[in-house]
Image (cartoon, rainbow, N blue to C red):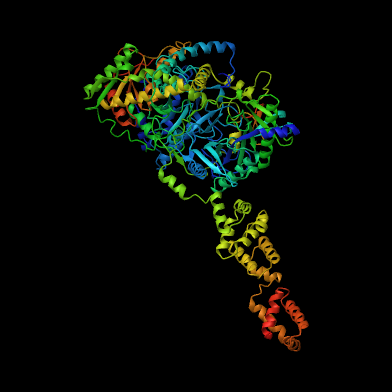
């Protein structure tokens, strides 16, 4: 982008709305009892219903409805009686050449999401629908345009999805990323999703438009489909906003269309114009009946809701007073419980937060965090001076790698947690072993002090604190 | 309309069908003309709600039995000629 | 049952009782029906597929069970013909369409499973109008079925094959499907009993869908009691069908002969208009028989019924256009190539559907697509659903003063082959008496009524409110008892 347009970009505001498709973590598909599992041999998780065999009929999965309700509650939506509609269009990954979805009477409406940095993004709706099969293009490097033919696997067909549609309240690529990251945390917290964007559990479509700063009208938008990493999301939105600004600044028009994000090329390319779009001929699904969760069911779902990220952040902030960034990382990585437990056990909050953020968070890729109880003891050992900061980090690393008690591990390393008795014993032993030098020490000979400290250090393998040894010696000597 | 239904029709068919359908639509217009404001549409003759099933795995179909009925298959998947457009 | 047809004089109930007791072998029963098939099937073409070997194996199984002292089931040894839109695992199910020619379903319809569990012997898959769209079975891609009473005439449709099979003695019972009259109308034209149950009483799982909110599977039989027996076996909740009523299978045989003393019967005025005089006369005569048996007969009005045909021809094609979208050549059935090879999958879709569907199916898909399209939905489909509400309200009002209703089943007797094929609208009018019950989701049954001196049967239709099968069948049994006898020599019979 030229310097001139970079400047001009300030005159423009980016407007983004996001549609996030979330695959639900149910055991079975939305309308049939086939397993909902990723990565299986093609067409081994199919039945008459999800392959659209003539005569087959859908039956709604109770758990999918419950998860949809959880998502609705987590996003502060109203849960409404809802019905299913057929969205009619032809495509080979569609077993019935219509998708069963929700149209004008969806299960969740009118919610919002709070960003960790503050600010709310409106959520227009979060509805249930079924996923399609998977197409593999053969020939032409796997891209659709140069393929010779395509192959279809219906294992994924019928997997339950909740589509979450935000209001166009997002104003930057970074904010979009924060929205998706927080939404992902929320979805994982509700148990509805495993959050694995790389496996397609979460798929994001971005609707991007620009308008002159200060305007309240919406510009023409372009839809960028299937962004499956946060990085792509940010890059695509930045690119697209800049593209639109350049077009408009040059006096052109934005065409309402679907665009494709080209990861390798770092740009969006024109896809299908929305003017030519299908008429989906929505009508209520006659093979299904309405869903109206009663007060009892809602109550049970509400009661079983976990503590959500926003609440966890406030809770941790209150307990530790730690800075916002650390709070965000700890909740994001699920280590807030660990820190809270440590603090409850009497450990120093600041130290607990530091160890968790710096040492534990980074090691989560390699293994689970230590049990809260052991972690709390370790932090206490550090804050009570039994371990130096360096020693504590080493012991913690051992705990993360192999598990085990902090006291055990410290002993193994030779970092004895010198309780005052141990120190006293060590001093007594050295005094006994060196009576002549002891008389000289008691007589006030300063030189000998160094000798005694050295001996005690040797005996305790360096675990004694120099100052503490000297103090003990002087006490014994009556100095 | 033929495109939406993915039916290619010959010009003769189009002409014949148009005339026949026009007659049926004449009757449809009788219905369209009725003043039914305030009448709720009936999607289902009998009022059922909340028909749900438990989230329990049921036996799947044998892939071979299903693929044996496929017009074209390759590597355990259904084979189709190349797809030119993205999904709507 | 057609007099003179093999097994005549023996009802399905009697057959089952005889087989269960060992007096009769299922194998013998089957051979009787297979002989009838051999004699007249070429002429009548009731079947798309006769399952001779399988049926013999099934019959043998029934006889084995009886010999071993095991319960062979309530339908033991009864031969049953299945409309070829009911999925039978591993056995061709075509809907009489080229687009499913040779297709073997990987699963059985729920009703088929229930039949087999009760010892029925499936003798074949019967011909129908393609995808159940039609009123004469002339829309079959495999040639029409002919009326056993007069082979120059249609058997009715869409379940023409099943109706003819029972009428000609090819099977003791049959199953069909009814969306706008497709069981009742052919039953009437073939002189047998045909019943459409309350919507949701019989599972639709495995019934290849035409119009989902209207379709129901139901029995064809020679007598009202036989129809009740078959309905008892197939009815009842099915967890595989979300629109299946959460009700246990009804008890219908018990109380069937309870009589109609004090029963309030209403003849529906709107359905008596525009039908042939003989059809109206049959209804009056049947009403007379009921009256003589102690019923109170009156005229009632269901005003919105006159909009039934128009509403139906918006709702049914609309749902059908969506239900038939799946026939695209990808997963099963016909795949056709565009001339010169398919450049892409879209061309393959279009070529497959052009080659695979017949004219009537294409017409209805177009009509349905139109009724649902943007800008027209509310005026057409949406409006038709409102008409449906009116029809239900008017029926509810009528049932406040009546227990059951009466009407002709069809406007007249069987018409000649090709008499109505060039004018779809004329064909659609065959269903004017049957359609309102589908829209309302109510049950209805047709009882044969042979007008004096006529060689062609008519049907008298008994209608009841939702889940009113028991009272409906009681009235039907009374009409049957008072009905004139069928002529002794059926047209073309052996």
Where is residue C226? Give x, y as percent. Answer: 35, 29
Looking at the rendering, in which quadrant would you find the C terminus of chain A?
bottom right
Where is residue C231? Give x, y as percent. Answer: 38, 32
Q: Residue furthest right?
A: A447
Where is residue B80? Give x, y as percent. Answer: 65, 29
Which of the two residues, C195 or A324, is positioned nearer the viewer here? Answer: A324
Which of the two residues, A253 or B72, is positioned nearer the viewer here? Answer: A253
Up/down of A46 relative to A272, above or below: below
- Along the horizontal axis of the image, is B20 left or right of A133? left
Which of the two residues, A358 or A214, is positioned nearer the viewer here? Answer: A214
Q: How many marks?
A: 0
Residue C7 visible, this orientation: no
Kindly indicate the quadrant of the structure image that contains residue B26: top left
Residue A198 visible, this orientation: yes
- Along the horizontal axis of the image, is C462 left or right of A185? left
Looking at the rendering, in which quadrant would you find the N terminus of chain A?
top right
Which of the two residues, B20 or A471, is positioned nearer the viewer here? Answer: A471
Where is residue C350? Give x, y as percent. Answer: 60, 21
- Along the horizontal axis of the image, is C64 left or right of C295? right
């Amino acid at each position: 982008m030229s310097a001139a347009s970079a400047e001009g970009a300030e005159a423009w505001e980016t407007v983004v709305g996001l549609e996030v498709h979330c695959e639900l973590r149910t055991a079975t598909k939305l309308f049939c009892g086939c397993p909902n599992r990723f990565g299986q041999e093609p067409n081994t998780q199919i039945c008459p219903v999800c392959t659209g065999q003539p005569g087959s009929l859908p039956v709604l999965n109770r758990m999918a409805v419950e998860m949809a309700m959880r998502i609705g509650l987590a996003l502060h939506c109203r849960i409404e009686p809802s019905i299913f509609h057929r969205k009619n269009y032809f495509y080979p990954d569609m077993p019935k050449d219509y998708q069963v979805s929700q149209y004008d009477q969806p299960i969740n409406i009118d919610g919002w999401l709070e960003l960790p940095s503050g600010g709310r993004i409106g959520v227009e709706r979060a509805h249930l629908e079924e996923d399609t099969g998977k197409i593999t293009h053969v020939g032409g490097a796997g891209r659709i345009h140069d393929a010779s033919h395509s192959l279809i696997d219906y294992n994924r067909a019928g997997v339950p999805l909740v589509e979450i549609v935000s209001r166009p309240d997002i104003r930057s690529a970074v904010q979009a990323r924060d929205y998706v990251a927080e939404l992902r945390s929320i979805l994982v917290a509700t148990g509805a999703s495993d959050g694995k964007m790389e496996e397609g559990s979460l798929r994001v479509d971005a609707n991007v438009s620009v308008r002159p700063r200060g305007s309240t009208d919406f510009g023409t938008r372009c839809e960028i489909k299937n962004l499956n990493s946060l990085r792509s999301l940010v890059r695509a939105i930045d690119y697209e906003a800049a593209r639109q600004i350049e077009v408009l600044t040059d006096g052109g028009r934005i065409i309402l269309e679907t665009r494709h994000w080209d990861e390798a090329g770092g740009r969006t390319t024109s896809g299908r114009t929305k003017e030519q779009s299908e008429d989906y001929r929505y009508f209520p699904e006659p093979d299904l009946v309405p869903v109206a969760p009663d007060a009892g069911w809602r109550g049970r779902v509400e009661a079983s809701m976990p503590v959500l990220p926003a609440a966890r952040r406030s809770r941790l902030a209150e307990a530790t007073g730690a800075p916002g960034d650390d709070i965000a990382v700890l909740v994001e990585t699920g280590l807030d419980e660990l820190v809270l437990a440590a603090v409850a056990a009497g450990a120093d909050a600041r130290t607990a937060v530091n160890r968790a953020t710096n040492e534990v968070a980074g090691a989560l890729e390699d293994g689970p965090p230590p049990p809260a109880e052991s972690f709390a003891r370790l932090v206490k050992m550090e804050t009570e001076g039994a371990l130096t900061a360096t020693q504590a980090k080493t012991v913690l690393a051992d705990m993360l790698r192999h598990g085990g008690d902090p006291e055990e591990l410290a002993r193994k390393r030779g970092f004895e947690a010198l309780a005052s008795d141990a120190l006293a014993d060590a001093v007594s032993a050295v005094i006994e072993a060196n009576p002549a030098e002891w008389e000289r020490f008691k007589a006030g000979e300063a030189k000998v002090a160094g000798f005694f400290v050295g001996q005690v250090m040797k005996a305790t393998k360096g675990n004694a604190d120099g100052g503490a040894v000297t103090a003990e010696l002087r006490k014994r000597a009556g100095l | 309309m033929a495109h939406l239904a993915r039916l290619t029709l010959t010009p003769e068919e189009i002409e014949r069908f148009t005339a026949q359908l026009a007659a049926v639509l004449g009757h449809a217009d009788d219905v369209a003309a009725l003043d039914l404001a305030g009448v709720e549409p009936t999607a289902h003759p009998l009022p059922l709600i909340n028909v749900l099933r438990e989230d329990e795995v049921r036996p799947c179909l044998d892939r071979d039995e299903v693929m044996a009925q496929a017009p074209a298959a390759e590597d355990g998947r259904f084979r189709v000629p190349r797809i030119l457009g993205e999904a709507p | 049952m057609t007099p003179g047809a093999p097994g005549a004089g023996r009802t399905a109930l009697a057959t089952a009782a005889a087989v269960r007791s060992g007096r009769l072998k299922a194998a013998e029963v089957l051979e009787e029906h297979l002989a009838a098939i051999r004699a007249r099937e070429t002429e009548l073409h009731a079947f798309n597929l006769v399952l001779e070997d399988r049926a013999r194996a099934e019959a043998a199984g029934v006889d084995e069970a009886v010999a071993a002292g095991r319960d062979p089931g309530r339908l033991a040894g009864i031969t049953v013909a299945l409309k070829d839109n009911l999925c039978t695992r591993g056995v061709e199910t075509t809907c009489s369409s080229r687009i499913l020619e040779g297709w073997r379903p990987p699963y059985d319809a729920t009703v088929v499973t229930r039949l087999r569990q009760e010892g029925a012997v499936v003798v074949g898959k019967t011909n129908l109008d393609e995808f159940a769209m039609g009123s004469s079975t002339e829309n079959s891609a495999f040639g029409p079925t002919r009326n056993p009473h007069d082979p120059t005439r249609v058997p009715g449709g869409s379940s023409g094959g099943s109706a003819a099979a029972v009428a000609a003695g090819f099977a003791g019972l049959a199953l069909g499907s009814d969306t706008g009259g497709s069981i009742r109308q052919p039953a009437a034209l073939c002189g047998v009993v045909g019943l459409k149950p309350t919507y949701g009483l019989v599972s639709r799982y495995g019934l290849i869908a035409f119009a989902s909110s209207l379709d129901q599977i139901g029995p064809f039989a020679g007598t009202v009691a036989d129809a009740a027996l078959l309905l008892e076996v197939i009815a009842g909740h099915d967890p595989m069908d979300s629109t299946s009523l959460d009700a246990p299978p009804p008890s219908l045989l018990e109380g069937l002969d309870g009589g109609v003393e004090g029963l309030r019967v209403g003849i529906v005025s709107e359905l008596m208009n525009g039908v042939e005089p003989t059809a109206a006369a049959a209804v009056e005569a049947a009403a007379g028989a009921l009256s003589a048996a102690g019923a109170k007969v009156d005229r009632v009005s269901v005003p919105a019924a006159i909009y039934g045909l128009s509403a139906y021809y918006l709702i049914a094609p609309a749902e059908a256009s969506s239900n038939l979208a799946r026939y695209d050549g990808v997963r099963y059935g016909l795949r056709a190539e565009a001339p010169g090879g398919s450049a892409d999958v879209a061309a393959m879709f279009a070529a497959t559907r052009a080659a695979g569907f017949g004219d009537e199916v294409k017409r209805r898909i177009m009509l349905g697509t139109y009724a649902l399209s943007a800008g027209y939905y509310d005026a057409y489909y949406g409006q038709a659903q409102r008409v449906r509400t009116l029809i239900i309200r008017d029926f509810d009002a009528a049932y406040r003063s009546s227990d059951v209703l009466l009407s002709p089943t069809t406007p007249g007797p069987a018409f000649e082959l090709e008499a109505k094929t060039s004018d779809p609208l004329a064909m659609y009018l065959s269903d004017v008496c049957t359609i309102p019950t589908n829209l309302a989701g109510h049950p209805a049954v047709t009882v044969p009524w042979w007008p004096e001196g006529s060689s062609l049967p008519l049907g008298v239709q008994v209608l009841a409110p939702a889940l009113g099968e028991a009272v409906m069948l009681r009235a039907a049994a009374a009409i049957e008892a008072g009905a004139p006898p069928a002529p002794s020599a059926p047209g073309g019979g052996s």
